[in-house]
Image (cartoon, rainbow, N blue to C red):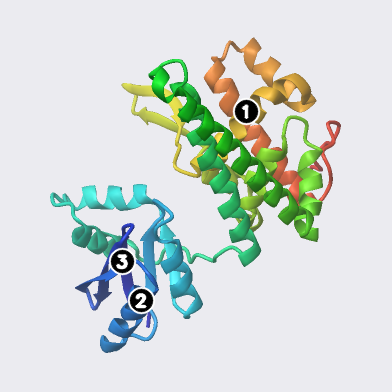
Amino acid sequence: MSEPILGVDIAKKKFDVALLISEKLKHKVFMNNQEGFELLAAWLHTQNVDRVHVCLEASSTYGDALALYMHDTGHTVSIVNPARIKGFAQSELVRTKNDKQDAGVIARRAMDPEPWTPAPPEMRQLQVLVRRVDALITMRTQELHRLGTAHTTIEDSIREHIAYLDRHIDTLKQQIADRIKNDPDLTVKRDLLKSIPGIGDATIAAILAELHMFERCDRVQKVVAFVGLAPRQFLSGSSLKGRPRLSKVGSARLRKALYMPALVSIQCNPIIQTLYRRLKEKEKNGKLIVCAIMRKLVHLVFGILKSGRPFDPNFKPHCA
């Protein structure tokens, strides 16, 4: 007998659940903290449910602690793409949108989704550091944009904040470097990634923070889809033929991390330079070229991590 489905609509302070048993939904609301998680476990027990298949949207970090708690207590957990949930709700002509309704939609849609496995603890710690640096850099950029436009009364305050952010960014970057250095496996993979011309320390840290996704995927196309770099076509019969675009249904963090390396690689990576010249000869526009280069970098990263061999511009894949 399959496990009952528990749809979860998560927010910062609370989460709504919808327990799907025998095609009937039971709703409940809990606080998004350890006490709330334990109350959820107790409520499931009162429903005579020992194991459930928990399904959450992959829309924020608010659900990370709950997903980890439910996984560690023996339940199956799936992180469902929000686009699937939205599409299912539209297919059911759902007109009401609230947390209770969303939890029910997730429970009904989540029929046998792929189980989720959390990254190892050391990887999760690296993720936290990398994402914090990214957040601080965003704050710093916002403050820099204010200089020259803000009133002179607060310019000193802005500069002090920028200096404060600089210090903390440097401290966290050092912690990231130390964590990678103290992990033999991450050190090996860092050195492999460093062999790719155009990829620097910040991008390497971002890739290593999501390393579990590269290791779980058996084909590079899955990684490309995870990053959100797969092309999306608009074709229907003979009358509708739109331009292909990026799906962007994937990790915005990795897309952001690969953007600057794509530009730098045009200047120093022989494989990327060949691709760049070929696309320029076909008169492709700049945005399309950059996206193609980002996809190529994902292929290079995937191949190097899977093979354990450093970058070789003359490498020819074996063809059976």
Mark 1 vs mark 3: in front: 1
Tell me which label, 1 or 3, sits earlier in the chain: 3
Determine which residue is flagged by label 2. Answer: 35
Mark 3 vs mark 2: in front: 2
Q: Amino acid at mark 2?
A: Glu
Q: Position of residue 227 (x, y in %)?
A: 54, 42
Secondary structure under tag 3 reads: strand
Determine which residue is flagged by label 3. Answer: 7
Q: Position of residue 43 (x, y in %)?
A: 28, 82
In this view, 78 is above or below 276: below
* Residue at mark 1 to residue at mark 3: CA–CA distance: 38 Å
Q: Amino acid at mark 1?
A: Met
Tell me the crowding category of disc 3: few under 14, some 14 to 19, or many 20 or more residues within 10 angstroms, Cα based. many
Q: Residue at x 78, y 59 (%)?
A: 182
Q: Amino acid at mark 3?
A: Gly
* Callout 1–callout 3 Cβ contact below 8 Å: no
**Which of the numbered marks, if any, corresponds to residue 21?**
none
171 with respect to 65 (left or right):
right
